[in-house]
């Protein structure tokens, strides 16, 4: 009788031991996965080639607009782009470019907030330089958050996220427009609400031969 009584507590003790070690291994695995994610090297991102545009006879026009008009246009485009996806993000033009959305992290989603400064390039394209970035309450390196953005956020083919440089390259001149008009950025001053775009109209689009 004494031997039977002592065997039961021993089995229960072994069961709790197995449970404890399983839980410990799970926590160690989770910690190692998180450390690997944070310290994994950030990859290089090639930019679209904008040097091969064909030279056509054309006329150029400067179109000025407001932050509100551009903001409505950008988000209408994003709504269409994200229509068949599970992802959701939007852009708000304030004193800077504010990207708001969600990112999937470990079987859930966390809020994403990125403030970017638009820098117009000589070729009429734009670099959005990261000013501040956060992903919920997680404290991750900025480059890692942008790597995650690059992986999970659907972007137009003419938009490139470059985690290493902490910037987003917007090749406006590479946009495909049905009218065949070519668009580039002339000037952006969000604080002064002063935005100007250059519209290039090839004569051949209008059926004009020179």
Image (cartoon, rainbow, N blue to C red):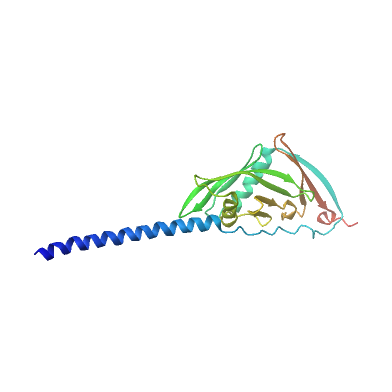
Left/right placement of residue 170 relative to residue 101 reads: right
Q: Nearer the viewer, residue 12 or 62?
A: 12
> Which residue is located at x 43 percent, y 60 percent?
29
Q: Quadrant of residue 152?
A: bottom right
Q: Quadrant of residue 160?
A: bottom right
Q: Position of residue 143 (x, y in %)?
A: 60, 52
Left/right placement of residue 100 relative to residue 1 reads: right
Left/right placement of residue 2 relative to residue 196 reads: left
Residue 113 in view in this figure: no
Which quadrant of the rendered structure holds the N terminus?
bottom left
Left/right placement of residue 173 relative to residue 153 reads: right
> Which residue is located at x 81 percent, y 50 percent?
200
Q: Nearer the viewer, residue 146 or 80?
A: 146
Q: Position of residue 163 (x, y in %)?
A: 63, 53
Q: Position of residue 196 (x, y in %)?
A: 76, 41
- Count of labels shown? 0
Q: Quadrant of residue 189?
A: top right
Identify the residue at the far left of this view: 1
Identify the residue at the far right of this view: 210
């Amino acid at each position: 009788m004494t031997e039977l009584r002592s065997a039961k507590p021993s089995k229960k003790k072994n069961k709790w031991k197995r449970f404890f070690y399983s839980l410990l291994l799970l926590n160690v695995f989770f910690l190692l996965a998180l450390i690997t994610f944070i310290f994994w090297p950030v990859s290089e991102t090639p930019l679209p080639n904008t040097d091969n545009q064909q030279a056509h006879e054309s006329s150029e026009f400067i179109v000025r607009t407001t932050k509100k008009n551009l903001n409505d246009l950008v988000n209408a485009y994003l709504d269409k782009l994200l229509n068949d996806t599970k992802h959701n993000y939007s852009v708000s033009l304030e004193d800077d470019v504010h990207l708001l959305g969600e990112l999937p992290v470990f079987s859930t989603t966390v809020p994403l907030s990125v403030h970017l400064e638009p820098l117009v390039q000589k070729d009429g394209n734009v670099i959005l330089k990261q000013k501040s970035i956060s992903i919920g309450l997680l404290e991750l390196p900025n480059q890692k958050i942008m790597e995650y953005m690059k992986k999970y956020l659907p972007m137009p083919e003419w938009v490139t996220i470059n985690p290493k440089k902490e910037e987003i390259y917007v090749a406006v001149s590479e946009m495909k427009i049905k009218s065949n008009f070519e668009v580039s950025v002339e000037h952006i001053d969000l604080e002064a609400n002063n935005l100007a775009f250059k519209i290039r109209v090839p004569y051949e689009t209008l059926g004009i031969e020179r």
